[in-house]
């Protein structure tokens, strides 16, 4: 198991400057978590549900930083960032930090090419988020603003038989008040039940990819380790199945990605049930 960032957020001699930050995220759960972390640091956080809303909000100006999800309906984060960079004046120069569950090098390059300045990985680590926010709030007041991308942190694979990531839950307990944590966990469980039902009944690969991507993100955020791993595998299998060679009669090959999609669609409901049961066994009122 990898070592997580310690609870200390910033060096003791550095105090964050309260600023206006736009959180662009289609998951209400992730919105709640990120805005709560920012509010605790004294920042004023506002939300947009997709890239189109973000561009419209940014046109009015006044934001010091934008935190941008990548995969969203209506308009994705990469397209939104390109449009933001075309805005005149200060609105076009606001630092944009990607929030992404996609951690490979190709995604890092796509973010940088779109005009983003940096990234934080999902599930969001409170210390890393606030340190990155502070870095770009300070950098935006200096000339020569440029991208500051480092290597993406790789996703941590689920250990065999490990349903929940206790470190993630312990960090959430530090980041959120007990009542708020209970509320967001209940919402996560409700949202997950609905999403898993859609995954089980959906056949359209594009829809399945979006659902799996969001489930990967939220499950990781709330420590559902095995479910997150399966959702990540489903997303990858869906993408691969679209490009998989067809058989002689135009049917998808029976070996490979298409089979993996069907297998994972069958496994995910059980994994979701296991996660919910594990939350309850751990004393969470979900």
Image (cartoon, rainbow, N blue to C red):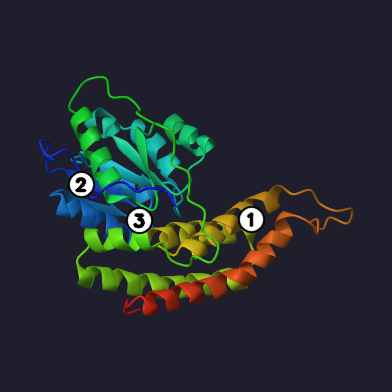
Asked if the residues shown at circle 3 and circle 1 are in contact, with their CB atoms under 8 angstroms apart, the answer is: no
Residue 202 seen in the figure: no
Q: Dot 2: what SS?
A: loop
Q: Which one is in front, 194 or 4?
A: 4
Would residue 185 be found to the left or right of residue 208 on screen? left
As drawn, the residue found furthest toward the right would be 248
As drawn, the residue found furthest toward the top would be 144
Q: Residue at x 79, y 57 (%)?
A: 255
Would residue 260 be found to the left or right of residue 115 on screen? right
N-terminal of the pair, mark 3 or mark 1, is: 3
**Residue that numbered label 1 is attached to:** 238
Marks 2, 1: nearer the viewer: 2
Instruction: Give the percent coordinates (x, y) of residue 263.
Output: 68, 66
User: On screen, 33 above or below 12?
Assistant: below
Q: Residues within 10 Å of mark 1 (few under 14, many from 20)?
A: many
N-terminal of the pair, mark 2 or mark 1, is: 2
Instruction: Give the percent coordinates (x, y) of residue 283.
Output: 32, 78
Asked if the residues shown at circle 2 and circle 1 are in contact, with their CB atoms under 8 angstroms apart, the answer is: no
Q: Dot 3: what SS?
A: loop
Residue 174 seen in the figure: yes
Q: Dot 1: what SS?
A: helix
Residue 49 circle label? 3
Between the C-alphas of marks 2 and 1, the distance is: 39 Å
User: On screen, 179 above or below 107?
Assistant: below
């Amino acid at each position: 198991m990898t070592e997580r960032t310690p609870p200390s957020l910033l060096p003791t001699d550095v105090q964050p400057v309260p600023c206006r930050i736009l959180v662009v995220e289609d998951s209400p759960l992730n919105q709640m978590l990120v805005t709560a972390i920012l509010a605790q640091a004294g920042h004023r956080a506002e939300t947009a549900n997709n890239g189109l809303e973000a561009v419209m909000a940014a046109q009015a100006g006044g934001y010091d930083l934008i935190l941008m999800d990548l995969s969203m309906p209506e308009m994705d984060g990469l397209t939104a960032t390109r449009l933001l960079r075309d805005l005149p004046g200060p609105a076009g120069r606001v630092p944009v930090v990607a929030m992404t569950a996609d951690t490979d090098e190709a995604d890092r390059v796509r973010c940088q090419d779109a005009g983003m300045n940096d990234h934080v990985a999902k599930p969001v680590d409170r210390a890393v988020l606030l340190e990155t926010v502070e870095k770009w709030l300070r950098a935006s007041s200096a000339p020569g603003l440029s991208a500051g991308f480092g290597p993406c942190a790789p996703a941590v694979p689920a250990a065999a038989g490990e349903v929940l990531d206790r470190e993630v839950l312990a960090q959430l307990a530090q980041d959120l008040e007990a009542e708020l944590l209970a509320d967001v966990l209940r919402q996560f469980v409700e949202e997950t039940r609905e999403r898993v039902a859609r995954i089980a009944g959906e056949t359209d690969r594009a829809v399945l990819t979006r659902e799996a991507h969001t489930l990967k993100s939220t499950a990781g955020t709330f420590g559902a380790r095995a479910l997150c791993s399966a959702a990540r595998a489903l997303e990858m299998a869906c993408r691969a199945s679209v490009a998989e060679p067809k058989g002689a009669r135009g049917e998808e090959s029976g070996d490979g990605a298409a089979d993996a999609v069907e297998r994972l669609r069958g496994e995910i409901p059980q994994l979701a049930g296991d996660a919910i049961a594990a939350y309850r066994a751990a004393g969470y009122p979900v």
